[in-house]
Image (cartoon, rainbow, N blue to C red):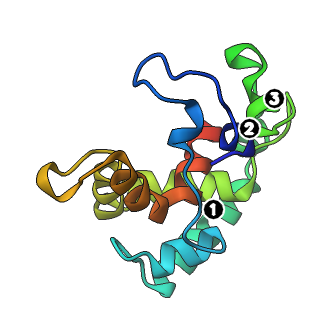
Amino acid sequence: YWDYYKANTNVDTLNGGFISDWFVTNKHRDFKHEILHNKQCQLSKQTFDYLLEYAQLYMTCERARKLRATAAFGGVLLREYGIEKRSAITLPHILALMLYCNMHDLQRVFLASFNARGATDKSIDDVINRHSQFAHLAKHLRESV
């Protein structure tokens, strides 16, 4: 999801090949479009707007205002994700967490997008292509937890 991985020619010691082989591009122009027009699991605009409003409300509470990026994983946040240490959590990150935790069908289909589907997936490219329907959600979730 991040440019750091797009051209990363380091060897993937777990799976073989290169780290760049696992780069996932966005199928959708932005996060909202991804959730409303996803081929695998769509939410209605009404549901999306409700969760967005709830996320905006949550951003005003003291607990949310205290959520900050940490320096976990040896500086990965800035180097790989472009997130400054101690920066505040953003609305898209809160929304991603709310979608994942509250929309169980979306969560199930999202999680399944990480896995090969037997005979229907001929290569890892098939899995990456399917998962690219959730690139924005996955990126925001990974940056949040």
Q: Amino acid at mark 1?
A: Ala
Give the mark, 1 or 2, whose residue is nearer the N terminus.
Answer: 2
Question: Disc 2 to disc 3, how far (Cα)?
Answer: 8 Å
Q: Residue at x 35, y 52 (%)?
A: 127
Residue 55: give its label: 1
Q: Residue at x 23, y 54 (%)?
A: 121
Pick the residue in front: 57 or 11. Answer: 11
Between the residue at mark 1 and the residue at mark 2, the CA separation in whole angstroms equals 29 Å
The amino acid beneath tag 3 is Arg
Q: Amino acid at mark 2?
A: Tyr
Which sits earlier in the primary sequence, circle 2 or circle 3? 2
Task: Please say if the residues under marks 2 and 3 sit with CB atoms less than 8 Å apart.
Answer: yes
Q: Position of residue 45 (x, y in %)?
A: 50, 86
Q: Secondary structure at mark 1?
A: helix
The residue lying at 63 percent from left, 52 percent from top is 94
Mark linked to residue 79: 3
| Observer-nearest of 87 and 11 | 11
User: Considering depth in this image, is 81 or 120 the residue closer to the camera?
Assistant: 120
Q: What number is the disc on residue 78?
A: none
Per the image, the residue denoted by label 2 is 4
- The alpha-carbon separation of the residues under discs 1 and 3 comes to 28 Å
Q: Nearer the viewer, mark 2 or mark 3?
A: 2
Classify 10 Å Cα crowding around label 3: few (below 14), some (14-19), many (20 and above): few
How many numbered circles does the render carry? Answer: 3
